[in-house]
Every structure is written in C-alpha cells, then in structure tokens.
Amino acid sequence: MNGERRSVIVGAGTTLLTAITGYLSTDIDDSSDDGERAAADERADPDPIIVDRIAPDPSLVWVDDEPADGQHEFSAEIYNAGTPGTVGMTLLWLDDPETASNGEPARRRERFFEANEREELSVTALIPEEYGAYDLQLWVAEFGVEIENDGAGGRIAVTLVEEERTVDETELTIDAGETVSLSFDGEYTDVDPAALDLEARPVS
C-alpha cells in the first residue's frame, strides 16, 4: 500500500548490518516509494462527495373535498420546506384507502413554490362509482445536487434513487478538486419526494 515501510533482514554481524541498512535506506527505499506513488497515480479514481441537495420538500398541511356543480373540488394546502422549485399534486382514485400506491390517476396540478411558501392547490373531478376513496399525492419536477470531487479527475455516475430503485441517472466528467452542480428534470409523479436520495460513484 502507498506509504507502507518495507523491512530488510540481513544475516550478518552488527557492523555489516548497520552498513547495509544505511545503504538501502538511501537507494532501494526511495525507488520503492517512487514505484508505489506511480502505482497509486495509475489507479487513481474520482472520489465524488455529495455536499448539497437542491430540491423542493413539499408536505400536505390539510386536505379537503367539497361538492362543486355536480363534481367534487379536491383541495390541499402545501408547504415547501425545501428550495424553490415546481411541486405537483395528483388526484388518485382508490378501491381501498389502504392501497394508495395502486391508485388510478385522475387529475393533476402543478405550480412553482418558493422556499418556505405555503399555498393551496385544487382539482375538480367527478367521482367514478367504482371507486370508494381518493388520495392526493405530491411530487417534484426537479431535483438538483452539488458534488465535490476529492479524488482524481475522471467520469462519475450520479443516480437519483428511491430506496433501492433507480429513478434517474446521468454521467459527467469532473476534474480533480472541482465542484459541480447538476439537475434532474422530469415529472417524477410516482415517487415520494421524501424518499428520494442521491448516490455518486466513479465510472470504471
């Protein structure tokens, strides 16, 4: 390994051992260190570190539904605890309130939220007879990240994940010591914003 000291064992008397040890320390040890440094340079990779996440962080403050001209108006007050960005809301029809993830999308709305903004979104729809419940699901349309490279220059992969599922991925080239920002832009309507995470790794 780089920086590891190597020992030399010589089966001789004390005088000879001292002389040989002194000679090797100025010749062989130096070349060994040079070889280890060269090997380290050859296998050097980027070491990407995520230093900041840049995304809205929406949450529902309250939800309501009211009859409106033979239909229903479904409303929610949303608070954005994250950075400015687009937040969406989707109305889902449910067979069973316990299975919200399997709902049928019906209507959706989106708008730009400033940081710490609280605002109401609403959609109007006719409730189908075959469904007995509904859900209002929040999502984000953009997700940014700032990455610092603590290793050598090269290519890295940045992945947007929900638990162990890959939601989106991109690759880029980054220099040694460089800090870059990038953004994932898409309608991540089937992903819980609170469950999103980021991973960065060198590309071999």
Image (cartoon, rainbow, N blue to C red):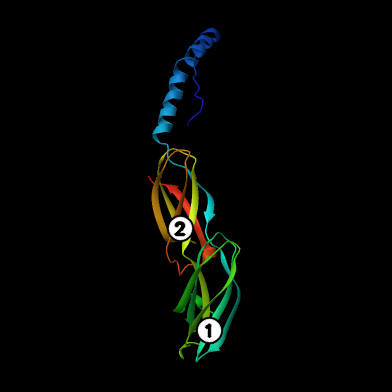
Residue where numbered disc 2 is placed: 160
| Left or right: where 193 falls relative to 42 | right
Task: Give the x, y percent position of residue 198.
Answer: 49, 55
- The amino acid type of the residue labelled 2 equals Leu
How far is the residue under mark 1 from the one under mark 2? 34 Å
In the foreground, 68 or 40? 68
Tell me if mark 2 has few (under 14), some (14-19) or many (20+) residues whose alpha carbon lies within 10 angstroms of its own: many
- Label 2 residue SS: strand
| Eye-nearest disc, 1 or 2 | 1
Count neighbours of disc 1 (C-alpha within 10 A) and say few if under 14, some if 14 to 19, many if 20 or more: some
Residue closer to the observer: 95 or 180: 180
Q: Based on the displayed image, in which of its 4 quarters is residue 34 positioned?
A: top left
Question: Which residue shows up at 48% across the image and 56% down it?
Answer: 144
Q: Amino acid at mark 1?
A: Glu
Q: Position of residue 190 (x, y in %)?
A: 45, 70
Q: Is residue 92 above or below residue 57?
A: below
Q: Which label was assigned to residue 161?
A: none
Task: Report x, y in % for residue 65.
Answer: 56, 84
Q: Earlier in the sequence, mark 1 or mark 2?
A: 1
Quarter of the image with the C terminus is: top left
Instruction: Name above or below for residue 204 compared with residue 5.
Output: below
Count up the numbered dots: 2
Task: Say if 44 sits above or below 119 in the image.
Answer: above
Label annotation for residue 73: 1
Residue at the image position 58 percent from the left and 69 percent from the top: 59
Side of 169 relative to 99 (left or right): left
Labelled pair 1, 2 in contact (Cβ < 8 Å): no
Of 86 and 161, nearer the camera is 86
At mark 1, the secondary structure is strand
> Is residue 10 among what the camera can see?
no
Residue 173 visible, this angle: yes
> Where is residue 29 drawn, in percent x and y?
47, 20
